[in-house]
Image: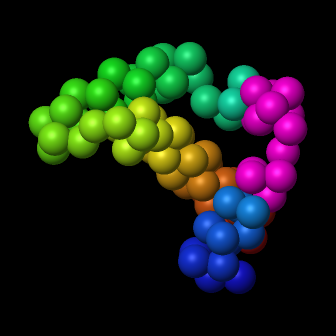
Amino acid sequence: MNHTELAWEFAEVFNELPIEQINQVLAKNVPLEMLEFFSSYAGSFGESESLSGDTLKRLPNLMLLGYLLRVLEERLLQDE
């Protein structure tokens, strides 16, 4: 499986998770400081790029998904 296929598969699985399972994934894989960083940085970055509305609100989630995908990739590489 290449990186693109992995990303699509991850997005599909993540999209189907109930909220309580998403919270478990976050709790097990993302330090609280990282969540706070994504929220703060995304707000600053989004405003500096003149983003607004839903786009600005969703930017921290996009960063978080990218982070989780990278964690998954690193773990899969360790297993090889």
Up/down of 37 relative to 58, above or below: above
Can the viewer see residue 67 in this picture?
A: no
Residue interval drawn in magenta: 13-25
Give the residue drawn at x 35%, y 36%.
53
Q: Quadrant of the C terminus?
A: bottom right
Image x and y of residue 7, in percent: 62, 67
The residue at 60%/54% (across/down) is: 69
Q: Is residue 17 magenta?
A: yes
* 50 to 40, vertically: above or below: below
Q: Nearer the viewer, residue 74 or 16?
A: 16
Q: Position of residue 73 (x, y in %)?
A: 62, 60
Relative horizontal placement of residue 59, taking residue 18 as reference (left or right): left
> Looking at the rendering, which quadrant does residue 41 occupy?
top left
Q: In screen coordinates, is 62 left or right of 56?
A: right
Which residue occupies 69% across, 31% down?
A: 26
Where in the figure is residue 78, as x and y percent of width and height?
A: 69, 59
Above-or-below relation of 47 to 6? above
Residue 3 locus on image (x, y percent) = 58, 75
